[in-house]
Image (spheres, coloured by chain):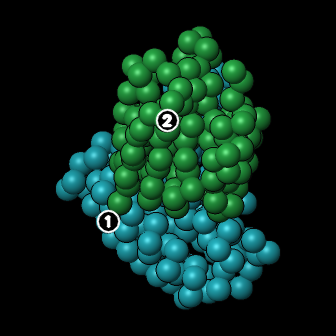
Chain colours: A cyan, B green
Amino acid sequence: MTKKLIIRCSKDELIRVRQFTADALDERNIPDLQTHKLVLAVDEVCANLIIHANNCELINKIEFDIKFKPTQIAFTFKDKGIGFDINEYKSPSMDDLISARRQGGLGLILVKRIMDKIEFYNEKSYNICRLIKTYPL
Amino acid sequence: MTEINKENKEDIHLISVKGEIDAGSSILLDNAFREALKNNKKKIAADLSELEYISSAGLGVFISYLEEFSANNIQLVLFGIKESVKQVFDILGLEKLLLIVKTEKDAMNAFDD
């Protein structure tokens, strides 16, 4: 089963993405604590795409879908912004963040710790970012 | 919907956070901490009992003030965090960097005089 959502590149859309994801996971009876973490990872990637890949350009769109498979859940983002492979991102250390008094940098650490696999590739001029969580969650 | 209330309780500056803190609303938390710094109180307590969700943008606000609080001898205590939200702090190991207690009473007792 696949659930789909299309959003504008606005931070105001994040709440809609979270609600959409929470509802889809709730329909599958995923436990609340797990749902909270998966929603967070989705929110982090989506915020990154809106802010950094698409510079909050309202005209730009992000297509998001959730696919429930027998052994895993796949969360897929498709956009035409600046491509960015999370797997190649070197996360800063916590000490660096504290001493630099930086507010950014934690999001992708969370995504990597919550999800089992992250895929990134280009397809027909779209960037595809897919987060995979394998059962048991 | 995010709501942040601030009040002074004797020598403590209390910040109460309600709702959801994400990339759009983390600026409200940042403003609250900036105001707290101007307040000149050396004890800041953050009531997170009605915080339903926090993303890295909000967590980053806590992290970004650690050095400044330390340099100004300001103590920060967080209390009342729901289990779902607490697990997010734990994923990043923030429980080792931030003083997190269960109740408001615990928070008041956690401050050094």
Q: Is residue B58 above or below residue B39?
A: below
Distance CA(mark 1)–CA(mark 2): 43 Å
Identify which residue, A127 or A91, lies in the foreground.
Answer: A91
Judged from this view, the residue extending furthest toward the front is B10
Label annotation for residue A72: none
Identify which residue, B17 or A40, lies in the foreground.
Answer: B17
Q: Is residue B13 above or below residue A74?
A: above
Identify the subunit bearing mark 2. B
Q: Are marks 1 and 2 in contact (CB under 8 Å)?
A: no
Q: Residues within 10 Å of mark 2 (few under 14, many from 20)?
A: few
Residue A112 spot, x, y in % from top left = 67, 50
Kindly identify which residue carries mark 1.
A7
Give the residue type at disc 1. Answer: Ile
Identify the subunit bearing mark 1. A
SS category of the residue bearing label 1? strand
Give the residue type at disc 2. Answer: Lys
Residue at the image position 44 percent from the left and 27 percent from the top: B36
Residue at the image position 36 percent from the left and 41 percent from the top: B28
Q: Is residue B50 visible?
A: yes
Numbered disc total = 2
Judged from this view, the residue extending furthest toward the left is A59
Identify which residue, A32 or B4, lies in the foreground.
Answer: B4
Kindly identify which residue carries mark 2.
B9
Residue A60 spot, x, y in % from top left = 26, 56
Q: Quadrant of residue A30?
A: bottom right
SS category of the residue bearing label 2? strand
Q: In which quadrant will I find the C terminus of chain B?
A: top right
Residue B93 spot, x, y in % from top left = 74, 41
Q: Residues within 10 Å of mark 1 (few under 14, many from 20)?
A: some
Q: Is residue A109 visible?
A: no
